[in-house]
Amino acid sequence: MGIESWFLRMAEFGRPDGAKRLGDALVKPGDIYTWRWHGWPDEVEELGRIIDCNGIDYFKFSFGDAGNCVVTIKEESQGYPLLSCSIRHSNDERRTIGI
């Protein structure tokens, strides 16, 4: 479940000391991740670090050369969730995608 129910086919998280987080354990700032995408071979992995999160509606992580990504979930006026993803590049450029 979790992030794998959105768009990843595999998501593994581990503590900074390398020990894996199991099952539905919440990730914490400083954790590391390995992700595999749908449609890509197993050799293609995204590796990064969790920068900040609150376990509810805020998730900030490093995202390779793209920079840092912030995902927030907010409730819209009609009760539907709005997922927002902002990526801050190393040159401080910011792009936001609302889903």
Image (spheres, helix red, strand yellow):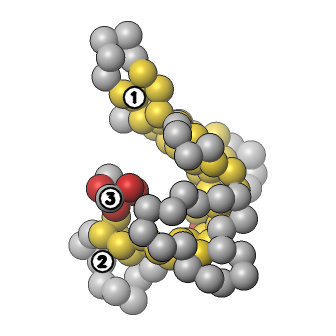
Q: Quadrant of the C terminus?
A: top left
> Mark 1 highlights which residue?
82
Asked whether residue 82 is in view, the answer is: yes
Can you tell which quarter of the image residue 63 is in?
bottom right
**Closer to the camera: disc 3 or disc 1?**
3
Query: Residue flagged by tag 1: what amino acid is it?
Result: Leu
Quick one: SS at disc 2?
A: loop
Position of 14 compared to 74: left or right? right
Quick one: SS at disc 3?
A: loop
Is 23 drawn above or below residue 76 in the view shown?
below
Residue at horizontal 31%, vertical 22%? 80
- Circle nearer the N terminus (3, 2): 3
> Mark 2 highlights which residue?
40
C-beta proximity under 8 Å, tags 2 and 1? no
As drawn, the residue found furthest toward the left would be: 39
Q: Which mark is residue 1?
A: 3
Residue at horizontal 38%, vertical 55%? 2
Q: Position of residue 60 (x, y in %)?
A: 62, 50
C-alpha distance separating marks 3 and 1: 19 Å
- Circle nearer the N terminus (3, 1): 3
Q: Position of residue 68 (x, y in %)?
A: 65, 54
Q: Quadrant of the N terminus?
A: bottom left
Q: Position of residue 83 (x, y in %)?
A: 42, 35
Quick one: SS at disc 1?
A: strand
**Closer to the camera: disc 2 or disc 1?**
1
Query: Residue flagged by tag 3: what amino acid is it?
Result: Met
